[in-house]
Amino acid sequence: MKLTLHVWRQKSTSQKGAFETHVMDSVSPDMSFLEMLDELNQALITNGKEPVAFDHDCREGICGSCGVVINGRPHGPQRATTACQLHMRSYQDGQEIWVEPWRASAFPVVKDLMVDRTSFDRIIQSGGFISVRTGSAPDANEIPVPKVDADKAFDAAACIGCGACVAACPNASAMLFTAAKVSHMGLLPQGQPEREQRVLSMVSTMDEEGFGSCTNHKECQEACPKEISIDYISRMNRDYVCASKNKG
Amino acid sequence: MNQAQSFPRSSIGKKFLMAITGLMLLGFVLGHMIGNLKAFQGAEKFDAYALFLKEVGKPVLGKGDFLWMARLGLLAAVGIHIFCAVSLTLQNRKARPVGYKKTAREASTYASRTMLWGGIILALYVIYHILHLTTGHAHHDFGSSVYGNMVAGFKQWPVSLAYVIAQIALGMHLFHGFWSAFRTLGANNPNRDKKLRAIAVFLAVAITAGYLSIPVSVMAGIIQ
């Protein structure tokens, strides 16, 4: 496959970036998108140029490290797929591909396609924990959890924190991420003691980090590699209003 | 700051206020549309209805008292709705200072993406509409008959056109706004989602068609 690649290059957070065009002559359709970027970097290094910086780790679609916006779509065109699990067969010979980093003021570009997602970590730190007794581990299944709740909590817990929801949202909102994190603990009995403080703290941190607000476009749900539903946002709103009322 | 103070400052709090005021305004828009359909019953019934609105609450309330209370309530709702919209829009703009070169819209609708513009059209329209048929400042031949003012106004095609554009904007604003409000309020769940979408479509179409029927009928000579 022959591809024309327009890749965002930016030396550092403070410097201005621009697109750089590379023509790749022999891309295998069996390569993953990241392997294609590896090939590009190999060629750049061979020619004595600076390779393109991009985030990646497990390359199995479960770590949440990778993520670039490909032709306007976070993680590319395939549903429920991270960029590392996207294969070049999803593209056609001769196609032009634009590769951009996540765009949000809360995700400053570190270099090229790498963004700083520590704003997500700070949201987690503000409420993503539960109180546990110290000492020996409790018996497994000691606390009964209704199957429906366990399933819902697990669906929310599938969030890998990649940031595709923020990247896809026209408002750069982190509501889907925050809602998933609030819900996966709030749905379980172990998460009840901090339930109200958790949603208040996490939403407040989310706002402070400079994310946008939700206008129910549903773009986040479409882009999420773990297919997390916007129903969790509705659930978080309800939790937030109830907690505000009780703590008001 | 306690939570009662931080609630209206948070993004969810502002969205909550927008949803509540939006639903209040929807209630007004629905009632106003049903009332306006009396235009099809002729001048006498329509003017009698207009007089009734001024005299609601008699003899406890004086003439026009109820109307002014309703107007102040609506003004407050509109004010809060616009304030939150502006505040959230600025927050959203700030959240993405550098845009994408390529954008692909997969799930959002034309109505959802144009909520801001629809809102601006509606705000301008409301000002025009009040100057046109309430105070008469923007009317070419304003008299004492509410029915007469309406028919004379809509006989001019640019006036009717402005009303038609505004009603289409209203329909789209309601289509996304109604469904979105229930999501924001947390009153949505997977079982209700389809029903809320269906109600949103019904309300948007019914209200737009109801309002549009009046200028169109005047232009077509059905209402004279």
Image (cartoon, helix red, strand yellow):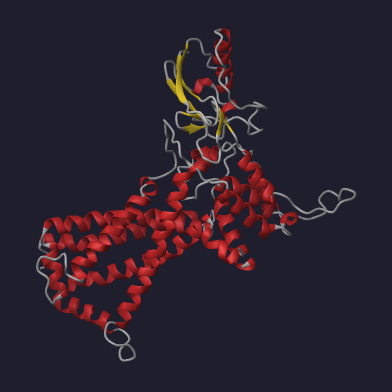
Number of numbered discs visible in the structure rendering: 0
Q: Is residue B156 left or right of residue A72?
A: left
The answer to which image quadrant residue A52 occupies is top right
Measured from the top left, where is residue A167 in percent x and y? 51, 38
Quarter that holds the C terminus of chain A: bottom right
Name the one closer to the observer, B13 or A146.
B13
Specify whether residue A93 is in view. Answer: yes
B33 left or right of A147? left
Asked whether, in this view, residue A116 is left or right of residue B65, the answer is right
Quarter holding residue B123: bottom left
**How far from the left and from the top, in percent, is residue A168?**
49, 39
Q: Residue furthest right?
A: A136
> In the image, what residue occupies the spot 42% across and 44% down?
B108
In x, y percent, where is residue B118?
32, 53
Relative to residue B1, is residue A232 depicted above or below?
Answer: above
Query: Considering depth in this image, is A115 or A178 the residue closer to the camera?
Result: A115
Looking at the image, which is closer to me, A207 or B119? Answer: A207
- At a point 47% along the width and 63% down the height, the residue shown is B17
